[in-house]
Image (tube, grey):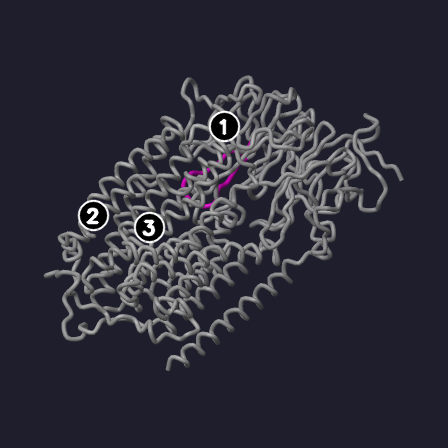
Amino acid sequence: MGHRSPNRSPRATPAEGATAAPAFGKLSRVGRNVVALGLTSLLTDVSSEMVTAILPLYLTFVLRFSPLQFGFFDGLYQGVTALVRIGSAVRADRRRQYKGVAALGYGTSALCKLGLLAAGTAWLPTTAILVVDRLGKGVRTAPRDALIALSSVRAHVAEAFGVHRAMDTAGALIGPLLAFAVLSTAPAAYDAVFAVSFAAGVAGLGALLLLVENRSGSAASERRPAVRLRGVIALLQIPQFRRLVFVGGLLSLVTVSDAFVYLVCQRRANLDPGVFPLLPVAVALAYLLLAIPAGRLADRIGRARVLLGGYAALAAVYALLAWPVADAPVILSSLPLLGTYYAATDGVLMALASRALPAPLLTSGLALLTTVTVLVRLVASTTFGAVWSWRGPQQAVLLFLIGLVGALSVSAVALRERR
Amino acid sequence: MRRWRALAFALLCTVCAAGAAVYVRHAARRTAVPSAGSAPPAEHPLGPADGSSLAVGEPAGQGAPALLFRSTGVDAAYGKLVLTPLDDVDARRVVSTFSCERVDYAGGRGVCLNADRGVATRYSAIIFDRRFQPVATLALGGVPSRVRVSPDGRLAAVTVFVSGHSYTGSFSTLTSVIDLERGAYLIPDLEQLAVWDGDQRLDAVDRNFWGVTFASDSDRFFATVSSGGRTHLIQGALSDHTAHTLRGDVECPSLSPDNTRVAFKRRVGEGIGPVRWRLSVLRLDTLEEVPLAEAHSIDDQAQWLDNDHVMYALPVQEGGSAETNTWVVDADGRGEPRVLVGRAYSAVRVPPIRINP
């Protein structure tokens, strides 16, 4: 398929950031399209987090699932996105229809909310719809990230991802609040939650269709290389991208899932149970506040540097969790650090990858990278759970801390050549 | 072109917001409970609604024992605590000014699990005395599921569902032990206990506890623990922070007043889909199990009315409605189940009532 150096790859014309409406103020640097994509994600996250927040209640109280069954379906949802990520990305790259494929994903998820409303208390349709909803998420992520990269000025690509992730996280914070507001107005009316979620999903899809422009690239029309799965694997021949996949996979291998972090927090700090639901909120708030500054910093001092800094923050989280003295303030200070880790890594890794990939295979490359990290993280969580059962939480955290420090050192060497 | 699109988006948002608002309003009307919507907030004391003072158990042994339960009839008393003499179950008396999702009472103290439905619903455990006056309130970490007070009224065990959030990515139960005298958590998370299955320690990360029941010494307890996809009945002692497994496939145990048997729900039918439970009784000396005469699926932690009868709640209509009746069935597997009190949930037998006008 003949990949080429990313510097000479046919890129989309830089976003018309300079001509963006003054209403966007400082955000104008990242371009109108990125803000519109952020709005799409914000509304969609409001929609999906509303359902996520009440799902356990709905499944156990209305559909009468046991917690064990719920755990099984939860695992199924997580794994299922990996199935469609690369397939949909190849499709998006082949036609350069990033917006179209993303719309398919957003539309599927929005429609699923309507399906939940119609399914009522029938459990089989409900679980099937929830799986399809997750598939929609798998379909839309890579083309959307590709559009963010294609819509932003090259020097500000990490900032663009930061803006998008901040808006996305804002939606994730609003969703649960809205869901519980609905349930407090209309007790036990889960259908009302699905109805509001559907409305938010439709608005999100509307933001994508009406406000986001597809960036098909200028050279697209004259030469459209056939995008094949083999070509996606061949992306690994690009040294810069290969290094990123290696580093992303390696660091993911020593990344503990959030659920475990909260569990360790709760056990070690002996927290009052009333505080437990607030732990994820603290992390999301830090992520929301730091996503844009972290992106800006990455554009200025180097994206690899900020990425490594983010994982250093994660190492600090582990160190605090493994701290010999189980002091509540010490343990709890790990939460804003965890938010910092997200702010400095999630969008920044995508920004790095989008700079390393040739435009014709941008979506496929991003999907390949996220598939690797998602799958490796599943392995990491299983490993962590096993070590926890075997040696206890403190030993498990300590082991992952040592692993992370090692992985960080290797990654620093691997990424050094980029600078 | 761009302006046209922005306008269309604004219009779409307006339509979506209006549609959502109309739906929620319609749902709010549909689910509205007459006058219960204006229920006063948690600052109001629990107490007889008409102002006369009322107490249970003093002086002891006078009159008929009573039942305390959560009223589920869709009327002004929806969700309130109601007392009724056992010999005249229609003589209902509302004793709370606010709602309880679940309640238990023993040894002169009670615990009401309350849901304060504000913008973000907050859940709390309200500890009250024999006059139904609150003495302390504790925040809960999730949606109330089960509560049991120890026979001496000194401790309570509370199980909540820790509700989901995509950031946690998991869903589990959290069981805590409360010191009712101090009004504070004694053991915030029962998972701190060492649980032994034979000579193997159960220490899986997915370990979950629920449905505690106390023995008459208020230290020994039984509970359900799930680990690695299996549920076990465990017996333990709070004083030495250990427990061991007794038997598999037992959920929500409830110890008989004479401490010889455990009523529980057993899962029937494997595989996916909604779970069904069969109400059964287990003899603790022989580990012999008797399914009770109730054929419906029971999702409740049963209570013993006396040594020979078990109480549980069932939805009034099949398929789940807010209204439930409290039923009673013989504990030996014979007899026919019958409705003990209509529109009642989480019922518990309490000493005779005394009213001071």
Q: Which residues are magenta?
A: B264-278
Q: Quadrant of residue B261?
A: top right
Q: Describe residue A26's horizontal placement relative to residue B96 as left or right.
A: left
Please name the amino acid that badge 1 sits on: Gln
| In contact (CB < 8 Å): disc 2 and disc 1 | no
| In contact (CB < 8 Å): disc 3 and disc 2 | no
Return the mark for residue A416. Answer: 2
Chain letter of the residue beneath label 3 in the structure image: A
Look at mark 1 in the image and give the residue it sits on: B192
Look at mark 3 in the image and give the residue it sits on: A345
Query: Could you tell which of marks 3 and 2 lies nearer the N-terminus?
Result: 3
Q: Quick one: SS at disc 3?
A: helix
- Residue A229 location, x and y as percent? 17, 57
Q: Is residue B277 magenta?
A: yes
Q: Is residue A151 magenta?
A: no
Alpha-carbon distance for marks 2 and 1? 45 Å
Q: Nearer the viewer, mark 2 or mark 1?
A: 2
Q: Tag 1: Cα neighbours inside 10 Å, few (<14), some, or many (≥20)?
A: some
Return the mark for residue B272. Answer: none
- Residue B189 location, x and y as percent? 53, 32
Please name the amino acid that badge 2 sits on: Arg
The vertical placement of A238 against B311, above or below, is below
Q: Quick one: SS at disc 2?
A: helix
Q: Describe residue A109's horizontal placement relative to residue B39 as left or right.
A: left
